[in-house]
Image (tube, grey):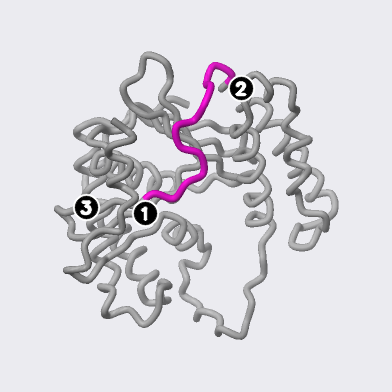
Amino acid sequence: MLQRDGYTARVQGSNELPERLLEDYKLEEMLRSPDRFIRPEPSAEQRPTLQWRHRVQYAVSHAINHFYSVDPDVRKEIPIQYVLEKWWPRKTDGFDSVLHYWDVKHKMIDELSLAIAANDDLKRPVILFEQWKTEIPSLQMSLSVIFQAAWQPEGWDALLVQKYMVVHDANVVEAFQHMVSVFCWEAFGKLPGMIEIYCLLEGRKIRYIPGRQSLQRSMDYIRLVRDSIPKAKEQESEHFTARDKIRVHEEVDRWRAQGTKPQKTWLM
């Protein structure tokens, strides 16, 4: 099931229509903006400050990718702190202080160790840090999602999708749930059995079980984000403009205010 539809998900698609492409990592950075991107974007000559969260996320992502690419029997003998150390920032630049640097590092080690222990029964991921793309014909757009880890546990006929976030953000969590639900439905013909999001700094694991009713709400969410982004031929660049970002936030806020409260199945 996954192999056949997975090939379709990777195909770039037809060039007959101007493509509206929604990419999860771009939407995530936009939603994380504390000032909602009201300030002007930096010029091309300016290099934005690399925040500590980005540097830690880089290390965590590489550590998880390396760890789960190892044979299950071998990785039982590998402490995650040794793997994380390979990519951990060598300097404290961007952190609040030296103490903050070490506090974050120790927290990442502790929480990753707990997550790995909880996933001990999972053997080999079917998707590991791959960017997948699929078309959504009903919305006349394409969707691109980076799957950090996706599994098909024994006895399951659907995917268990996992995401490892350094810092919890409710907007990012919600957006990821919607995007993964729609992506799996369109690419694989089946909703994920469960979505797990690890928020490492807070020590939280959020579990979400999509259903047919929640799928409609997820489609509505993707539709409103699509409508907030101009078509490819109208875009001046591949990036969101400041106006695009403000528009998306306004539309999401309006959608939440007018709509009914989503019915979700949450396990904390």
Nearer the viewer's eye, disc 2 or disc 3?
2
Residue type, mark 1 in image: Ser
State how far apart marks 2 and 3 are (Cα): 35 Å
Name the residue beneath numbered marker 1.
144
Residue type, mark 2 in image: Pro
Of 162 and 102, the residue lying toward us = 162
Q: For the point 32% across and 33% down, which residue is it?
A: 2
State how far apart marks 1 and 2 are (Cα): 29 Å
Q: Is residue 134 among the parts visible in the rendering? A: yes
Magenta stretch bounds: 120-132
The secondary structure type at the circle numbered 1 is: strand
Of 203 and 233, the residue lying toward us = 233
Which residue is situated farthest in the right direction here? 98
The mark that comes first in sequence, 1 or 3, is: 3
Q: For the point 28% across and 33% down, which residue is it?
A: 191
Nearer the viewer's eye, disc 1 or disc 2?
2
Of 267 and 47, the residue lying toward us = 47
Q: For the point 60% across and 40% down, which residue is it?
A: 65
Q: Around disc 2, counting alpha carbons within 10 Å, would you say few (fewer than 14), some (14 to 19), or many (20 or more)?
A: some
Name the residue beneath numbered marker 3.
136
**In the rendered view, would you say 62 is above or below 240?**
above
The mark that comes first in sequence, 2 or 3, is: 2
The secondary structure type at the circle numbered 3 is: strand
Q: Around disc 3, counting alpha carbons within 10 Å, would you say few (fewer than 14), some (14 to 19), or many (20 or more)?
A: some
Q: Report x, y in % for residue 167.
A: 59, 46
Magenta-drawn stretch contains 83: no
Name the residue beneath numbered marker 2.
72
Magenta-drawn stretch contains 121: yes
